[in-house]
Amino acid sequence: MASLTVRQLDEALKQQLRLRAARNGRSVEDEIRNILRSAAAEVEATAPMVAAAAEAKASAPARHPDVSVNRVLLIVGGGIAAYKSLDLIRRLKERGLSVRCILTKAAEHFVTPLAAGALVGERIFTDLFDPRTEFDVGHVRLARETDLIVAAPATADLVAKLAGGHADDLATAVLLATTAKILLAPAMNPRMWANKATQRNIAQLAADGFVFVGPNEGEMAEAGERGRGRMAEPLEITAAVEKLLGANQVRPLKGRRVLVTSGPTHEPIDPVRYIANRSSGKQGHAIAAAAARAGAEVTLVSGPVSLPDPPEVKTIHVESARDMLAAVEAALPVDIGIFAAAVADWRVAGEAQQKIKKRAGAATPELSLVENPDILSTIAHRKAQRPRLVIGFAAETENVVAHAKEKLAKKGCDWILANDVSPETGIMGGDMNTIQLVRDSGVESWPPQSKEDVAAMLIERIAQQMAAE
Ligand code: C5P
């Protein structure tokens, strides 16, 4: 195909494309090319898996058709607590859950579809009579393709509509059409909560099998207001979600052994001095934590960082590249190896055993360097005990994808997560990351997102790969 003309795009979609292109520093045309490339790569990568998953899971209706994760549909109602729903999306995704989101009309006064969409990683649903929604998803599919619906905040109005069985917008139509469990996180002014009508509606919904989390006692958003009516905190709601999913919660990496390297290495000059780099370990630690939440048995080999050890992860602390390689080899065999550490390329030849003294008139010491072992390459080229999936990172400052492709071949790994670490991106040591996933099957561009969200997305891709095998 020499060229492609796209006609009949509505203004809103054009605007979204322009924004996305600007964010990624591309022309709109390049952005569309990029989207098409990612879509093609995804179709190719998921095609065998869809067939395998369909066969294996024909009798398990409550699952996403192509990913073995639980799906949560979040309905955001129109109250001041809606701002917390953005954090809730993050918390749910951190737990490896797949999240879809509906904003009610009133909710759009508090959060924008753009902000919620950036966190969810897909479009947000807002209208019952949106021709796009009805064509490709529709309220009946939204209601059916979910394991659990969470309404947070559930306003007094939403609660009343539910108790009365109304269905005059997308949120209420989906809530009426679903057979999935429904968790409500009410949030309203204390007098509205205490009102007899609200209490009557709540009692009715509890009798109908709805589950509640909160509301809590405390300060309200309005100055001077206190009482019962505060929405439960995102972590409380997440805990209630996990409890409701219970034994049905899919842990897509259960039974898998995962090894992650993280942080910098310190290469000693003498007993008190060393050569280091600016890696914080945030990305590697987030990956180890996400893998553990997905049910994997995780070993994290970490260089010196100031982060706490992630929960439920066996963490081994090392200093130098050689120590890191030894710890990695001792942790084999594993199913998946993820090499996120910023390993120093060189160490000092002939490290001094005593502190090098500064002496008046003496020549400045000269450091000569020798190459460190390449841990990723060593493990990827192993004949015995090579992990089934070996994943590396490529931190580049230019020609990111081209260099990553070269690295994929040179290091013998299966996937590379490439990112631009030019100082102006703020990635090194920062909280955000923008990844291009480079695989033999193609390149996938991920949106700028937190390192936690990158970790969740990587675990999702790994789970797809494992399911396909
Ligand atoms: O060659 P470069 O340092 O750009 O490669 C980055 C990838 O290789 C990362 O995944 C990093 O963890 C890994 N690496 C390694 N051992 C080294 C150097 C890099 O495991 N000595």
Image (cartoon, grey):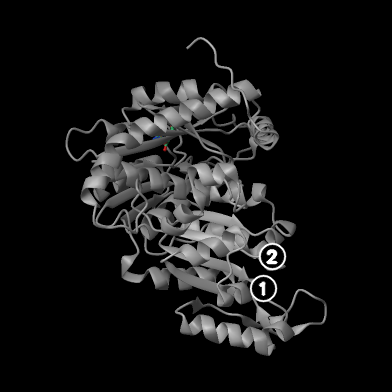
Query: Number of callouts in the render?
Result: 2
Residue lying furthest right in this view?
A: 223
Instruction: Identify the amino acid type marked 2.
Output: Gly
Callout 2: SS: loop
Quadrant of the drawing holding the C terminus: top left
Residue 443 visible somewhere in the drawing: no
Q: Are marks 2 and 1 in contact (CB under 8 Å)?
A: yes
Q: Quadrant of residue 379?
A: top left
* Discs 2/1, front: 1
Numbered mark located on residue 157 in the image: 1
Q: Does the residue labelled 2 lie within 8 Å of ligand 1?
A: no
Numbered mark located on residue 78 in the image: 2
Q: Quadrant of residue 45?
A: top left
Instruction: Identify the amino acid type marked 1.
Output: Asp
Residue lying furthest top in this view?
A: 2
Numbered mark located on residue 364 in the image: none
